[in-house]
Structures are given as structure tokens and as C-alpha cells.
Image: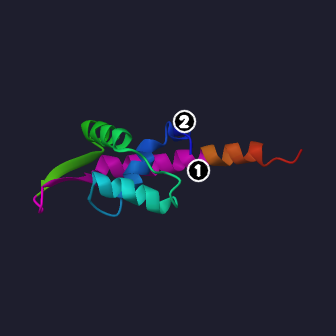
Amino acid sequence: MKAEVLKGHLDGLLLATLEGGPQHGYAVIDLLRQRTGGSLDLPTGTVYPALHRLERSGLIKSSWLETRPRPRRVYRLTAAGRRALTESRTTWAEFSAAVSAVLDAPM
């Protein structure tokens, strides 16, 4: 899938992966890959900057989990992140319905 398709939707996708509970960055990447049957196999260079941006904006929080062999930073949704996820879902439903109305229209 082309990277351009993700523009404007990456935040919602990342927030959705955290809805079930805290995850570390690689788990977020793996969950996106699993849920999309491999269609979204995003590089760390895309995901981690987006996670940091979401944290700066207050939509997620991170903390260090002391695990072996090394500590991991885990991310979780904030209340603002849950609201943003709801808004993202609404926006996506409206957008996808509008695009489908055009692309699926009979000729």
C-alpha cells in the first residue's frame, strides 16, 4: 500500500492499536501488520516519530517498563486520545462513505 494513502489517517490507526491497552512501539507496528493482513507494514521511522508527536499533543502517554533484556517504552491512550480516536472513526466513516459513493457509482 502506498504511503500517500495513510496521510491524515496514521494518527487514528495508531490510537486504535492502543485502545486495547498499553503497547510498546514494535507491538504497535506488529498489531497494525496483523490487523491489516500485512497491508500495513510500517517502518519504525514512520511509527516512532508519530508516537512521539501524539505524546507531545497529549493524546498518548508513555512510561518505561523494566523488562529483560532491556527496558521498553510503552504507550497508552489518554482521555484526550480516546476522544480523538472517536473523532477519527467518525471522520473516516464519513470520508469512506463519500469516496465509495463516487467510486462505486454505476457508469
Q: From what the image shows, is residue 48 above or below residue 39?
A: above
User: How many residues crowd mark 1 within 10 Å: few (<14), some (14–19), many (20+)?
Assistant: few
Q: Is residue 55 left or right of residue 40?
A: left
Kind of residue at disc 2: Glu
Cα separation between marks 2 and 1? 19 Å
For the C terminus, the image quarter is top right
User: How many residues crowd mark 2 within 10 Å: few (<14), some (14–19), many (20+)?
Assistant: few
User: From this viewpoint, which residue is outermost toward the right?
Assistant: 107
User: From this viewpoint, which residue is outermost toward the front?
Assistant: 69
Residue labelled with disc 2: 4
Q: Is residue 70 left or right of residue 96?
A: left
Residue labelled with disc 1: 93
Kind of residue at disc 1: Ala
Q: Is residue 78 magenta?
A: yes
Tell which of 26 and 52 is nearer to you: 26
- Look at 27% across and 51% down and name the residue there: 78
> How many numbered marks, from 0 up?
2
- Look at 34% across and 39% down and name the residue there: 45
- Look at 53% across and 49% down and name the residue there: 90
Tell which of 24 and 60 is nearer to you: 24
Looking at the picture, how far across and down is residue 103, in whole percent? 76, 44
- Look at 26% across and 41% down and name the residue there: 55
Task: Identify the element where label 1 is drawn.
Answer: helix
Magenta region: which residues? 66-94
Render colour scheme: rainbow
Earlier in the chain: of badge 2 and badge 1, it is: 2
